Image (tube, rainbow, N blue to C red):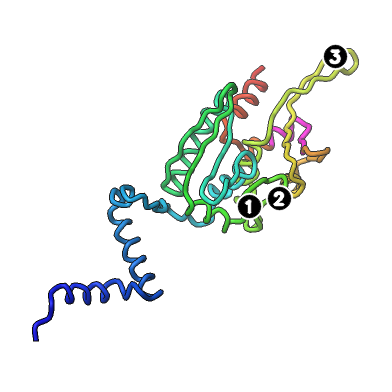
Amino acid sequence: MQINKSRLGGLRRVELYGNPGTPEGRSKGGKKTIRLFHRDKDLARKVGFIIRKEIKYPKRCAELAELIGVILGDGGLSGNHQLVISFNSRTDKEYSVFLGKILRKLFSIGYHIHPRKNCNGADMVVSSSNLVDFLLKQGLVAGNKVKNQVGIPDWIDEKIEYQKACLRGLIDTDGSFYSHRYNSNGKSYKYLKLCFANCSKPLLNSVLRILRKFDFKAYMHGDQVFINSMSGIKKYFVEIGTHNPKHSDKIIKFLVN
């Protein structure tokens, strides 16, 4: 009995992709198509098929903890596919380069810089649903951080090195070092203060708790946490450190002068 070639082709197609008239067949065919598009990304783009970017998934480490601190400070998860980190394009330009290296090292992923109009602000934008999904699993929350009253993820407290790294990321973004002057007995004195400002109470409490855990004489006033002594500032730079050149340059200049 001779079998029509087109029928043979149809049978082979059902074998490979399933019966298109059943849910199982459509699922099997869809998975085959997705694998095809992953192998041929040009074809996927031509037909308008969006493929998730492949990323590297790092284990929990100090660098990841520091990035979590950065995101809690000046970053955020926008929707379900974008990580945005804001910075000052004039004072934080070198720091943004450091953050770009961290992103590439941890996730093997690129980013785009979007300058803001009529100001020195800029945004580092990473578009990746896989990255956002991963960061959500690490304890971050999408949307407005103040409205959600976010705090430091629990796993940060598992190791001292994670706590220090996360604290460094927070203060490198939402922290500042500034000179304070006062007069006593006819003499003028000046010293540096550290101030961490944020409108999330859980985050403020976490920063205060970690600082005090490492024997810093820190206190909270309103939506700010302070270290008010030069000995405390020196201790901070020795034990916690900074990766933001604008902070290290400020203390070096102050001590030299």
Is residue 142 found inside the magenta-colored segment of the image? no
Amino acid at dot 3: Lys
Seen as rendered, the residue at the extreme left is: 2
Question: Which span is picked out in magenta?
Answer: 225-235
Q: Residues within 10 Å of mark 3 (few under 14, many from 20)?
A: few
Which residue corresponds to mark 2?
Answer: 148
Alpha carbons under labels 1 and 2: distance apart: 8 Å
Q: Position of residue 52 (x, y in %)?
A: 42, 53
| x 12%, y 81%: residue | 3
Q: Secondary structure at mark 1?
A: loop
Which residue corresponds to mark 1?
Answer: 141
Depth check, front residue: 167 or 119: 119
Determine whether, in the image, residue 172 is placed left or right of residue 149: left
Say which label, 1 or 2, has the lower sequence index: 1
Alpha carbons under labels 3 and 2: distance apart: 47 Å
Seen as rendered, the residue at the extreme bottom is: 1
